[in-house]
Amino acid sequence: MEQFFKMKEKGTDTRTEIMAGITTFMTMAYILAVNPSILGDAGMDKGAVFTATALASGIACVLMALLANLPFALSAGMGLNAYLAYTVVIGMGNLGKALAAHMKFSKSGFDVIGLFDKDPSIIGETVKGMPILSVDTLDDFCKENHPVAAVICVPEAAARQNVEMLVENGVMNFWNFSHFDIAAEFPGTISENVHLNDSLRTLNYQITHKHSDDE
């Protein structure tokens, strides 16, 4: 083994490398718990994620040793997992409830962790087992749970205040159903704007012109 990995040439020995390997494993082992937990929240099978994380890490480390002869340990990166997972929905009117109840967020890599509204009559109701919280608690919720994306389903007048609070808490990514121009007001944010009226007008235009062409 010492000859294969040229240990003497690199000023090390088998005992040192074994101890270094154990230390590295203990340092990285948290990934085996955290990675399945994050991606499990996003709808993936935790057991499958655990197995995939372990296999990918093991294979990558072996290949690094055999092909590059370098003492580098490789495993799953954690940052993008959280980026893809945690999302809040602001505004639980008909549209917000419909999205929360029927939209398959997890298949697109997002996990809804909070539902918010200002209407006292619906606060406390549940959608798919998740309670609707008062928007007054949004600031504390963001500080504790660190969402990275938000679905905005409130009127334009209310959108600014909600988005401002979210941006102050580090939420920079929005699926925006309001007519508030988030990207213009808050540079650096990413906003996918969905205007249902415009979409309906486009459909009407296509139908009208199709009929005209047929005649």
Image (cartoon, rainbow, N blue to C red):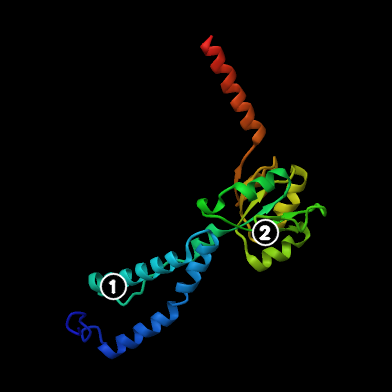
Residues at circles 1 and 2 in contact by the CB criterion of under 8 Å:
no
With respect to residue 191, does 207 lie above or below?
Answer: above
Q: Earlier in the sequence, mark 1 or mark 2?
A: 1
Mark 2 highlights which residue?
Answer: 130
- Nearest to the eye among marks 1 and 2: give it: 2
Q: Is residue 157 left or right of residue 98?
A: right
Q: Is residue 135 left or right of residue 70?
A: right
**Which sits in the foreground, 88 or 98?**
98
Q: Quadrant of the C terminus?
A: top right
- Amino acid under disc 1: Val
Of all residues shown, which one is farthest toward the left? 3
Up/down of 186 relative to 145, above or below: above
User: Which percent across, then down, holds residue 170?
Assistant: 63, 60
Which residue is rendered at x = 63% and y = 47% of the image? 99
Disc 1 to disc 2, C-alpha distance: 43 Å
Residue 48 occupies quadrant: bottom left
Residue 98 vertical placement versus 85 (above, below): above
Q: Which residue is mark 1?
A: 62
